[in-house]
Amino acid sequence: MSAASSADAEGITARLTALGLTPRVTEHAHHLVIEAEVPDSLPAEQWREALKAVAEADRFGLLANSLNGRTLWAAVHTETPATGDVRGPGNQR
């Protein structure tokens, strides 16, 4: 895991914790996932701050249903994704 991805995940986790949420971090093969349950009573300003925090991740979203409530999540890549030749066959030198 790169130091940058770990720092990103720690920063997101710290920001969500500061908002009164209880984030949990799970490590996967190529990314870390930060999840936090969001209570119905979370004020609008805290929602904005929570969204700003997860927007720092490579991917983020919200899972919501009547059984489990709302879970805000963010994924941070732990490895640099491989890049291919993005120029395409007509643009090669």
Image: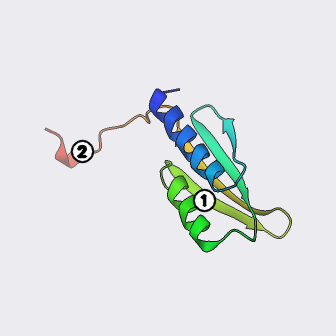
Quarter of the view holding residue 66: bottom right
Q: Is mark 2 on a helix, strand or loop?
A: helix
15 vs 25, left or right, is: left
Q: Residue at x 74, y 71 (%)?
A: 41
Q: Residue at x 24, y 45 (%)?
A: 87
Label 1 belongs to which residue? 61
Image quarter where the C terminus lies is top left
Number of numbered discs overlaid on the protein picture: 2
Task: Please provide percent x and percent y for residue 70.
Answer: 74, 64
76 versus 65 height, above or below:
above
Between 8 and 29, the one nearer to me in the picture? 8
Residue 89 - label: 2
Q: Which amino acid does label 2 sit on?
A: Pro
Task: Please provide percent x and percent y for residue 50.
Answer: 58, 59
Circle 2 crowding by C-alpha within 10 Å: few under 14, some 14–19, many from 20: few
93 versus 58 height, above or below:
above
89 versus 69 height, above or below:
above
Q: Nearer the viewer, mark 1 or mark 2?
A: 1
67 vs 88, left or right, is: right
- Distance in Å between CA atoms under marks 1 and 2: 35 Å
Between 20 and 48, the one nearer to me in the picture? 20
User: N-terminal of the two: label 1 or label 2?
Assistant: 1
Task: Please provide percent x and percent y for residue 89.
Answer: 24, 45
Asked whether the beta carbons under mark 1 and mark 2 sit within 8 Å of each other, the answer is no
Circle 1 crowding by C-alpha within 10 Å: few under 14, some 14–19, many from 20: some
64 vs 33, left or right, is: right
Q: Which residue is drawn at 59% across and 44% down?
A: 14
Q: Which residue lies furthest to the left in this view?
A: 93
How is the rendered protein coloured? rainbow
Quarter of the view holding residue 80: top left
